[in-house]
Image (spheres, grey):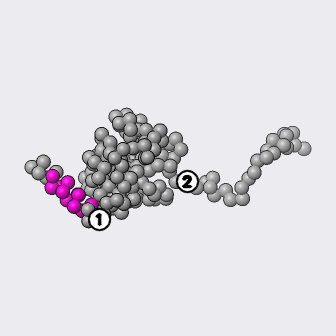
Amino acid sequence: MSTHDDDALGGVEIPDDLSSLTGPAAPDLVALITQIAGAEPLAAACSLAQVEADVVPTDVGAVAVLRDTSGDAPAHAAAALTTLVKGVPLVLVERTGEQLTMTRWSDGEPGDRLAPGLVLGGAPEALEDLLTGTTTLADQEGVVASSSISRWKAMRLLTSAARRARKGGA
């Protein structure tokens, strides 16, 4: 004999397929925070690395917001970019709901997990708002789509930037 109310679960429907409850959901936003100064050079690097992204300029470096956030696409994008631009680390940010996960990447390999508070502590407000979902990509100014830069133009841009960097450092 049951002592609890049998109607306590009245109206609750249990789906036939429970896989959506156990599988990881694709992040709402995936971004690559870089030290690359300027949206166009980062968009060019994304184009060459075959990473589809919209690149936002910020005061601390450009940020690539990935178009494909499913499966291992974020890790592939971080690996491809840090392999192409050796010696320039980036931070892979994944936002799922209100949860932020941040991982340092360098030379094609993941590194340490970082505390979001430490990364965002010195970040410009626009970057923080984008990553936390307070603003959207459409609210940002100066966005450059990687798909808008041909591979030929990307090579010219990056070669020119490398030449300028060598002259400035010599």
Residue 2: x %, y % from top left? 87, 43
| Whether label 2 touches label 1, CB < 8 Å | no
The disc label shown at residue 151, or none: 1
> Relative to 60, is 82 above or below?
below
Query: In the shown orientation, is residue 58 left or right of residue 19?
Result: left
Is residue 162 part of the magenta span, yes or no? yes
The residue range painted magenta reads 154-164
Query: In the shown orientation, is residue 97 left or right of residue 15?
Result: left
Query: What residue is disc 2 on?
Result: 24
Q: How many marks?
A: 2
* Of 159 and 83, the residue lying toward us: 159
Query: In the shown orientation, is residue 88 left or right of residue 78?
Result: left
Distance from disc 2 to disc 1, alpha carbons, whole Å, reads 34 Å
Q: Point out the image quarter for the N terminus.
A: top right
Say which element carries label 2.
loop
The residue located at (35%, 37%) in the rendering is: 123
